Image (cartoon, rainbow, N blue to C red):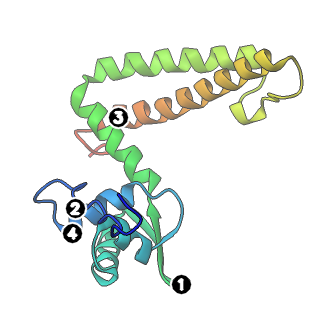
């Protein structure tokens, strides 16, 4: 490219053929981890701001995103609880109730091992940087991260157990 060539066109091919505007806004919204103006989401979803806002409001009504319509422009972010419910539902569909119960027991044992290892009840109570050399601190950071993952998985599998035992419902019918 010479210095006189026009700027390359933006890559509009990143969306699969046939992905409609709602689908693009949905995919972008699931990637939004902090409050983001609907105008930025529109740009990422390759649609107009009005279309993005319309679909984001619908996703908000469905519980998939959270909306802060008091801000100007309105801001949206994904609803982590929706994603957890979706993951738990997938687990409940893929595994038997007995397999889920076994996994919960394994996770509870790992959780107890971490509590014993660090002498605290929650990973946020671990003082990672208080002692040791760089390698020891790194090992502690990895262990705390693993512990947080165990706690998340424990929540998901416990929710999946409830769904599995209650025919897809959280509360027995």
Tell me if residue 49 comes above or below residue 137 in the rendering: below
Q: Residue at x 29, y 66 (%)?
A: 9
Badge 2 or badge 3: first in the primary sequence: 2
Residue denoted by label 2: 23
Residue denoted by label 1: 70
How far apart in space, not on screen, are marks 4 and 1 (Cα)?
A: 25 Å
Is the Cβ of the residue at disc 4 closer than 8 Å to that at disc 2?
yes
Foreground disc of the pair 4, 1: 4
Is the Cβ of the residue at disc 2 closer than 8 Å to that at disc 1?
no
- Mark 3 crowdedness (10 Å alpha carbons): few <14, some 14-19, many ≥20: many
Badge 4 or badge 1: first in the primary sequence: 4
* Residue ranking furthest to the left: 18
For residue 131, side relative to residue 61 (left or right): right
- Mark 1 crowdedness (10 Å alpha carbons): few <14, some 14-19, many ≥20: few
Residue 1 visible in rendering: yes
Report the front residue among 170 and 129: 129
Report the front residue among 29 and 5: 5
Badge 2 or badge 1: first in the primary sequence: 2
Is the Cβ of the residue at disc 2 closer than 8 Å to that at disc 3?
no
Residue denoted by label 3: 160
Mark 2: which secondary structure?
A: helix
Mark 3: which secondary structure?
A: helix
Q: Residue at x 37, y 55 (%)?
A: 30
For residue 153, side relative to residue 95 (left or right): right
Foreground disc of the pair 3, 4: 4
For residue 8, side relative to residue 18 (left or right): right
């Amino acid at each position: 490219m010479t210095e006189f060539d026009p700027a390359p066109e933006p890559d509009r091919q990143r969306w699969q053929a046939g992905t409609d505007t709602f689908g693009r806004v949905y995919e972008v919204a699931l990637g939004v981890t902090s409050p983001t103006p609907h105008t930025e989401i529109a740009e990422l979803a390759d649609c107009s701001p009005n279309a993005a806002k319309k679909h984001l409001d619908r996703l908000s009504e469905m519980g998939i995103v959270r909306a802060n319509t008091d801000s100007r422009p309105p801001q949206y972010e994904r609803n982590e609880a929706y994603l957890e419910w979706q993951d738990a539902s997938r687990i409940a569909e893929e595994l038997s109730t007995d397999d889920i119960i076994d996994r919960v027991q394994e996770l509870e044992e790992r959780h107890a091992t971490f509590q014993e290892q660090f002498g605290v009840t929650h990973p946020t109570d671990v003082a990672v940087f208080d002692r040791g050399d760089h390698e020891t601190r790194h090992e502690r950071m990895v262990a705390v991260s693993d512990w947080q993952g165990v706690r998340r998985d424990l929540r998901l599998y416990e929710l999946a157990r409830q769904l599995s035992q209650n025919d897809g419902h959280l509360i027995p019918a």
